[in-house]
């Protein structure tokens, strides 16, 4: 067990380090933040002075050594755009994104598992067809459009929910729904197909023949055995939500999380903040992956952790 | 089933009640901005969100009328030139900051020194770079000394927000701004909103709206939805195509001018005939109507709005004359040749659409157009490249000082960051105007510069874009040419 954790952590560190280095090199290759930050009409002298103040005029290898030194202390420096420590900004925004992801994915799981099971019980039945059609629809709709549609219907037409922002529980409903719907669509399909497979196995038939209660057979034995692929997808969806969907959903709903901040930092060529955000995202991905491995073991004790 | 219907109806009624009550009184006005301020220190950043909020908390030494004329504000009268490089400023008596600090000559001197201090590294330095120092000469009088004569100093003082000398040294100053303005800072919930309240002791005209909330919404569709849902009273940068969807909208001729810089020194555009033909070829009116739904004016052959100092109203736009353009291209022997047109996408309103439309017109005139749309940073590399100038570069110039100097130094004058000509006559006109303190003479120099650049067709002048604001039914505001969102000028119906 200890050996497993050790190996996983080393593995994770390599991933995080690799991502960080790539981001460092790429951001410095493609852009010049000084050009973007000062007014277009600024003179070359003013630009040079500004660049020097930011320390961006020094040779890249020197910047890199310093960067790696500070990385050990988790100090990325001050955001060029916001002029405050980049990690402060990340820690301020990350909880908002985690909240949004938790509600969105939570909603998707709560809806997908019962729906998928019901659909699987009678493949080809009415519920199954509606479910399959609905999830195809959910998968085909672009998320930003879905978000705007929700705003127009629920906030502009019926005026029952706010259009954007945060503050009350009502504010989270539309963004979380937008975040969770594609996940719900994918998850429902997977639950359905996994359950169809399981329900056709011999042990299920035997259990029924023995007279075990229906709920126990389907809800406990079959679902547990179908659980591994479902778990994998949920973990994957959590990662995609944190480090992907959040950009779109948060922009549409002006939700002050890490995704919106990331897109703003990229627009402003804020190298420091981009690094801090990508680093944090990498850490999240690695941690979620490790957590998933433990959950596999929990569901299926036969698995060896290695 | 009945129970659910009841719940649903209750929710709808609650919604109507909540929005209805918000509409009944005009206690609080909500303004949606495109970006959140990064700081509330008024002197450090070049940041539209910060400016929108701080314009109401701080006062400037001079201000402008909604039409753009400079008038005294914290100053009691317009600054006077006492020697070629020294301006005397006299302040109004009896003005205090929200925390009780006096607003006097020392405070203004302090504010000037703070913003020009190289160690402070202000992004606004280009607005103040000619100021050498300031010196208090009395309790309410001071001298501002410039590096050589600087006729634009009054415009610079319109940009200078006066900060309190004591409180601004507080490390929390950037989060708790204290000014002399008509609104006081109340709270800033990062990522969510900023609240201001009316300054009951304001020294000037009493503001009418009691309190203001700023929200920050980058996505234009979401801003629009918020206005339509009755959550906002004012949204900025409304897209032209949405004006018919909002309760009310206001449009004002703004500070932005899309132009195309032509390379006058080499390549196909070296020939004056070709440069003129490129102007005749473009139907600017169609651009204004087709792309901006009429919310733009045809630029009158100059990089200036009528409200700017230096505007020459005798110069008119090159008319749209496709036949003449075609003929001139043929006569110049340029027919079928390739012209490179550089642009970017998503930085300015309809930037890419304008470039593509212009390319279409040029093709009609008989040229092959190589349109190259770059990512913004790469685009800037081309715009600032002093060694090899592209044939034609699209850019949107914005001039917050409302004075010809800034735009002309950057784009008209040989060697300017975005200039593509080496016309020494033009450059010397701009240089002379820069240090000419006689207003009349200076005006004449700019008129000559405008005329010369027009005759030489160094640019294809396209449009002057209007700022469009979406507003709720209840808000009353005429808009301003300088795009400042002054709550003091707003009222509820």
Image: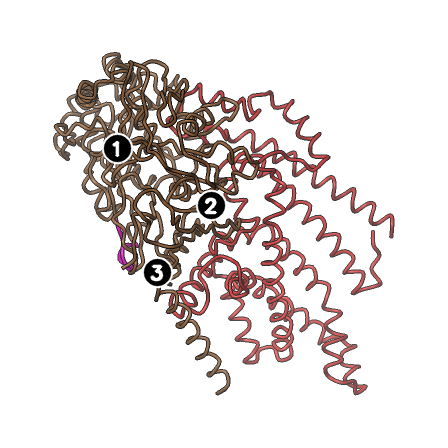
Seen at 56% across and 79% down, the residue is A127
Q: Which residue is mark 1?
A: B70
Color scheme of the displayed model: by chain
Residue A35 x %, y %: 45, 28
Q: Is residue B166 above or below residue A156?
A: above
Q: Nearer the viewer, mark 1 or mark 2?
A: 1
Q: Earlier in the sequence, mark 1 or mark 2?
A: 2
Which chain is displayed in red in the rendered image?
A
Q: CA distance from mark 3 to mark 1?
A: 31 Å
**Circle 1 sits in a helix, a strand or a loop, which is it?**
strand
Residue B139 x %, y %: 39, 26
Seen at 36% across and 17% down, the residue is B146
Mark 2: few/some/many CA within 10 Å (<14, 14-19, 20+): many
Q: What chain does badge 2 belong to?
A: B
Q: Which residue is mark 3?
A: B26
Residue B248 in the magenta stretch? The answer is yes
Which range of residues does the magenta coloring cover? B242-250
Q: In terms of image quadrants, where is residue A194?
A: bottom right
Mark 2 touching mark 3, by CB under 8 A? no
Residue B217 x %, y %: 44, 51
Which chain is displayed in brown in the rendered image?
B
């Amino acid at each position: 067990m200890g050996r497993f954790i050790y190996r996983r952590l080393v593995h994770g560190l390599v991933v995080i380090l690799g991502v960080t280095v790539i981001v460092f090199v790429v951001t410095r290759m493609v852009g010049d933040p000084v050009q973007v930050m000062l007014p277009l009409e600024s003179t070359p002298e003013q630009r040079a002075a500004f660049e020097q103040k930011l320390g961006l005029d020094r040779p890249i290898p020197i910047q890199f050594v310093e960067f790696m030194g500070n990385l050990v202390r988790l100090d990325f420096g001050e955001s060029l755009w916001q002029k405050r420590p980049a990690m402060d900004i990340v820690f301020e925004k990350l909880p908002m994104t985690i909240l949004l992801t938790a509600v969105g994915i939570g909603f998707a799981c709560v809806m997908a598992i019962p729906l998928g099971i019901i659909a699987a019980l009678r493949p080809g039945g009415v519920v199954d067809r509606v479910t399959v059609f609905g999830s195809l629809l959910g998968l085909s709709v672009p998320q930003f459009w879905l978000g705007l549609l929700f705003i127009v219907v629920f906030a502009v037409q019926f005026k029952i929910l706010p259009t954007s922002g945060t503050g009350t529980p009502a504010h989270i409903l539309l963004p979380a729904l937008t975040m969770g719907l594609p996940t719900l669509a994918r998850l429902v399909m997977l639950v359905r197909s996994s359950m169809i497979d399981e329900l056709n196995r011999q042990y299920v038939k035997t259990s029924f023949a023995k007279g075990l209660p229906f709920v126990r057979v389907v809800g406990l034995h079959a679902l547990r055995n179908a659980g591994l692929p479902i778990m994998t997808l949920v973990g994957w969806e959590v990662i995609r939500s944190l480090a992907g969907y959040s950009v779109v959903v948060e922009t549409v709903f002006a939700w002050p999380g890490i995704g919106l901040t990331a897109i703003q930092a990229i627009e402003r060529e804020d190298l420091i903040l981009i690094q801090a955000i990508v680093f944090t995202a990498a850490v999240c991905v690695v941690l979620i992956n490790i957590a998933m491995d433990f959950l596999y073991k929990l569901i299926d004790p036969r698995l060896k952790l290695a | 089933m009945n129970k659910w219907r009841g719940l649903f109806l209750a929710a709808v009624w609650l919604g109507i009640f909540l929005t209805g009550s918000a509409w009944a009184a005009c206690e609080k006005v909500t303004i949606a901005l495109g970006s959140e301020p990064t700081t509330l220190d008024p002197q450090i950043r070049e940041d539209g969100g910060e400016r929108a909020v701080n314009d109401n908390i701080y006062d400037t030494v001079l201000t402008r009328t909604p039409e753009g004329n400079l008038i005294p504000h914290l100053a009691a009268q317009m600054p006077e030139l006492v020697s070629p490089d020294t301006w005397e400023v006299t302040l109004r008596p009896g003005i205090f900051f929200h925390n009780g600090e006096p607003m006097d000559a020392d405070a203004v001197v302090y504010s000037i020194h703070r913003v020009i201090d190289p160690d402070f590294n202000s992004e606004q330095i280009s607005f103040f770079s000619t100021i050498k120092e300031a010196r208090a000469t009395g309790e309410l009088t001071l001298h501002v000394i410039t590096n050589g004569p600087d006729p634009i100093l009054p415009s610079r003082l319109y940009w200078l927000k006066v900060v309190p000398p004591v409180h601004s040294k507080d490390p929390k100053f950037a989060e708790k701004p204290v000014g002399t303005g008509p609104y006081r800072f109340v709270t800033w919930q990062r990522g969510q909103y900023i609240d201001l309240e009316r300054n009951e002791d304001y020294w000037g005209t009493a503001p009418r709206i009691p309190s203001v909330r700023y929200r920050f919404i980058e996505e234009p569709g979401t801003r629009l939805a918020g206005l339509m849902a009755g959550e906002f009273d004012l949204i900025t940068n409304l897209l032209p195509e949405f004006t018919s969807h909002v309760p009310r909208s206001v449009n004002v001729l703004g500070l932005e001018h899309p132009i195309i810089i032509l390379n006058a020194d080499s390549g196909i555009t070296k020939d004056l005939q070709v440069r003129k033909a490129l102007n005749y070829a473009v139907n600017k009116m169609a651009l204004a109507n087709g792309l901006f739904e009429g919310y733009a004016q045809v630029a009158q052959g100059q990089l200036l709005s009528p409200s700017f100092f230096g505007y020459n109203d005798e110069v008119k736009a090159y008319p749209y004359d496709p036949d003449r353009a075609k003929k001139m291209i043929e006569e110049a022997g340029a027919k079928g040749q390739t012209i490179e047109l550089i642009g970017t996408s998503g930085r300015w309103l309809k930037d890419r659409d304008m470039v593509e439309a212009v390319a279409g017109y040029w093709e009609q005139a008989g040229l092959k157009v190589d349109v190259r749309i770059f990512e913004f940073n790469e685009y800037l590399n081309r715009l600032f490249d002093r060694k090899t100038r592209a044939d034609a570069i699209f850019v949107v110039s914005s001039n917050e000082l409302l004075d010809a100097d800034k735009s002309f130094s950057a784009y008209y004058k040989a060697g300017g960051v975005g200039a593509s000509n080496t016309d020494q006559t033009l450059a010397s006109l701009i240089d002379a105007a820069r240090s000419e303190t006689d207003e009349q003479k200076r005006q004449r120099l700019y008129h000559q510069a405008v005329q010369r650049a027009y005759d030489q067709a160094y640019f294809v002048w396209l449009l002057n874009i209007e700022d469009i604001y979406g507003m709720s039914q209840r808000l009353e505001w005429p808009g301003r040419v300088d795009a400042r969102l002054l709550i003091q000028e707003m009222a509820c119906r």
